[in-house]
Image: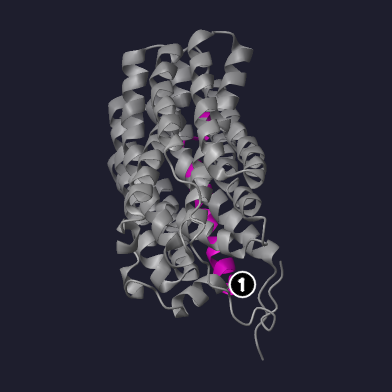
Amino acid sequence: MTKLRPPTWAILLICWVALLCDGYDLYVYGATLPGFLGDPSWGVTKSLAGTVGSIALVGMLLGSLAAGTLTDRLGRRKLLMTSLGIFSIGMILCAVAPNFTVFAIFRFITCIGVGGVLPTAVAIANESAPKGKVSLAVGAVLTGPPVGSLVGALTATALVVDHGVRPVYALGGLSIILLIVVWRWMPESEVFLAAKEAPVSGGHRGASVSRLFTARQLVPTLLFWIVCAISMLTMFGITTWLPVIMQGAGFAAQSSIAFLSIYSVGCIIGTVVIAWIAQQSAPKYMVILGFSIAAMSLLAVSMTQNHLLLFVAIFFAGVGGMGTQNMINDHIAQYYPAQVRATGLGWALAAGRLGAIAGPTYGAVAATVGGSPGAAAMWFAIPAVLGAVAAVAMPLRDKTASTPTPKNTTAEGVSS
């Protein structure tokens, strides 16, 4: 008897929850940073905090590279389970770390798992989406990271002042429950299974990484890497240091963390709206628009001290922040053919992690040298402008790329 596959909405929901947990675990560091800096027992300085934030993101780079190399060989399901297990255990270890040095080691391990989830979950969502609604489905799934960021910010707001940072990280360990769900109910991608059986022109299946550097794909691949790096430098610099920068501007600890919540809400709404528009046009155009919105919003932050206008500007910075990166992910996933989809996205994200690694350190410079929120915002507006320019050069979807058709779809009860 053939085992029935769960409906499409259930697969997409699992991907969304995985990315929510991923976003919580990733962005909670910035939300808890005021707690580390304000508790003398941790012995954390701004410079040390920026360095640890960057080193941890090296783990994300390794996780993205591993996922990009192995997911198109071993399967989406196995890599998703492995990544979930690593970052769930890592968050629990962070919660019980005896000092900041040990915390930094556990944070590094956590980020290895975090780096592997996104390319895997996006590949699954792309391949499970109803026909003609790929951008909408992927965009909906990609609201997971900003929702996770918002949950992390709200959790930190509620707990850090009175209870410290440990409970915030302990709650992140609850994602281990999702690992059981994926093991029990998540099927392997049919498109992956079909692509695995399909002949690969110009080489064998194991050469998927080299296919990113063929004469036709070399320039697009490099452009994707550049755009991802710029996007992540801006995004990770802001999410790591926004609460600290606003605290330096005179806001109380809880109010400063609230700015990260506003940024996250902008990310969520921006992802939904931009994904809907992308379905009518193309993700590339939304990437250009997103970078432009981020740049203008950050310039607005640099020009006002009005609290209401600051909240509005930070909201739109979120619209053009993570919303932009999500459209980059969507564009790359649609650009590459199925045989190298996860590989192309994983390696682009790995290249982007170089920008993410530089982001916290860049943010530390902006927070220290800039001195004021306005000056720091100007520092972050510069890469946003450069990102818009680079995005213009990105190619549109490779319409010659074919996607293998899943076999026995009717027999296996796939629902769309």
Residue drawn where x is 43% and y is 42% of the image = 394
Q: Nearer the viewer, residue 143 or 35?
A: 143
Q: Position of residue 286 (x, y in %)?
A: 56, 37
Principal secondary structure, stretch drawn in magenta: helix
- Quadrant of residue 360 within the rendered picture: top left
- Mark 1 packing: few (<14 Cα in 10 Å), some, or many (20+)? few
- Quadrant of residue 290 within the rendered picture: top right
Residue 170 colored magenta? yes
Residue drawn where x is 44% and y is 52% of the image = 92
Q: Nearer the viewer, residue 53 or 39?
A: 53
Q: Position of residue 217 (x, y in %)?
A: 36, 55
Left or right of 67, for residue 15: right
Q: Is 42 located above or below residue 141 in the figure?
A: above
| Quadrant including the C terminus | bottom right
Viewer can see residue 106: no
Residue drawn where x is 60% and y is 52% of the image = 138
- Residue at the disc numbered 1: 185
Residue 110 colored magenta? no
Residues rendered magenta in the picture: 161-186
Residue drawn where x is 28% and y is 27% of the image = 47
Q: Position of residue 298 (x, y in %)?
A: 49, 20
